Every structure is written in C-alpha cells, then in structure tokens.
Amino acid sequence: MKKGEDRMSDKKFFTYKGYPLVRMGDQLYYGNMYDNYVIWMQIQEKEKVGDLEVATKVKIYKMATDDKLSPIEAIVKQSEKPSLYSALDIAYVWLGKQNA
C-alpha cells in the first residue's frame, strides 16, 4: 500500500446506476457517503414468491451526511414504495437531482 492510500479504496462496492449500494439485513444504503446526501431504505414487509422473499413495502429516506446533525434532523425527504425496484428508482432520481 502506498503512502496516503486508504485500505477502503481497494474494496469494490456493488453499484446500481453508478452509485454504491450496500445491504445489511433489511436495510440498504445507496449513494456516496462523501456526497451531501445518501439514501437509506428499510424493507418493512416481505412476501414469499417461490423460494424467494420479495419486498412489498419499502420506506425510503434521503438523509444529509453532515455528522453534526442528529439522525432525525438529517432526514430531508421520505417516501414509501411497494417494491425494492420502485424504491431504488425513486432513490436514483433523488440522488440525480442532488448532483445535477
């Protein structure tokens, strides 16, 4: 490792439409933490479809990454969607408007 390099720079995250997407259980984080905002998604309900569990209710929060704000103050926008795909779709739009 060269001087000044970060070990995290060696790690690759899964991306969706150019933004990192990280999942931990029923929570997903979408976006770059070094940007002003990131999206936090919570899978609230799931149903079994064949052998898979499919999200049927997902809450989405657009949050400021400013660590001086409390988690409640950081939430600037929220929504609820009936699938993970539609949640990711609106999350992508929110991040795209932020970076436009």
Image (cartoon, rainbow, N blue to C red):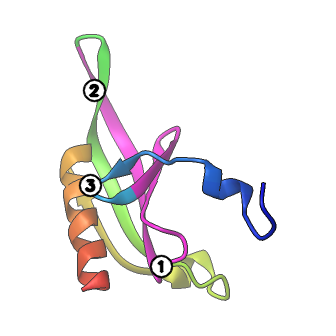
Over which residues does the magenta segment extend? 20-49
Per the image, label 3 sits on a secondary structure element best described as: helix
Of 66 and 54, the residue lying toward us: 66
**Percent x, y for residue 11?**
60, 48
Measuring 77% from the left and 70% from the top, which residue is drawn there?
4
Residue 93 found in image quarter = bottom left
Of 6 and 85, the residue lying toward us: 6
**Percent x, y for residue 19?**
37, 60
Does residue 36 sit above or below 12 in this rendering?
Answer: below
Per the image, label 2 sits on a secondary structure element best described as: strand
In magenta stretch: residue 59: no
**Percent x, y for residue 29?**
47, 57
Per the image, label 1 sits on a secondary structure element best described as: loop
Q: Give the mark nearest the N terminus, 3 or 2.
A: 2
Measuring 62% from the left and 86% from the top, which residue is drawn there?
69
The residue mark sitting in front, 3 or 2, is: 3
Residue 41 found in image quarter = bottom left
Q: Is residue 82 visible?
A: no
Residue topped by disc 1:
35
Tell me the crowding category of disc 1: few under 14, some 14 to 19, or many 20 or more residues within 10 angstroms, Cα based: few
Residue topped by disc 3:
88
Task: Specify whether 88 is left or right of 21.
Answer: left
Q: Which mark is residue 47?
A: 2
Q: Main secondary structure of the magenta part?
A: strand
Q: Which mark is residue 97?
A: none
Q: CA distance from mark 2 to mark 1?
A: 34 Å
Image quadrant where one finds the C terminus:
bottom left
Q: Amino acid at mark 1?
A: Asp
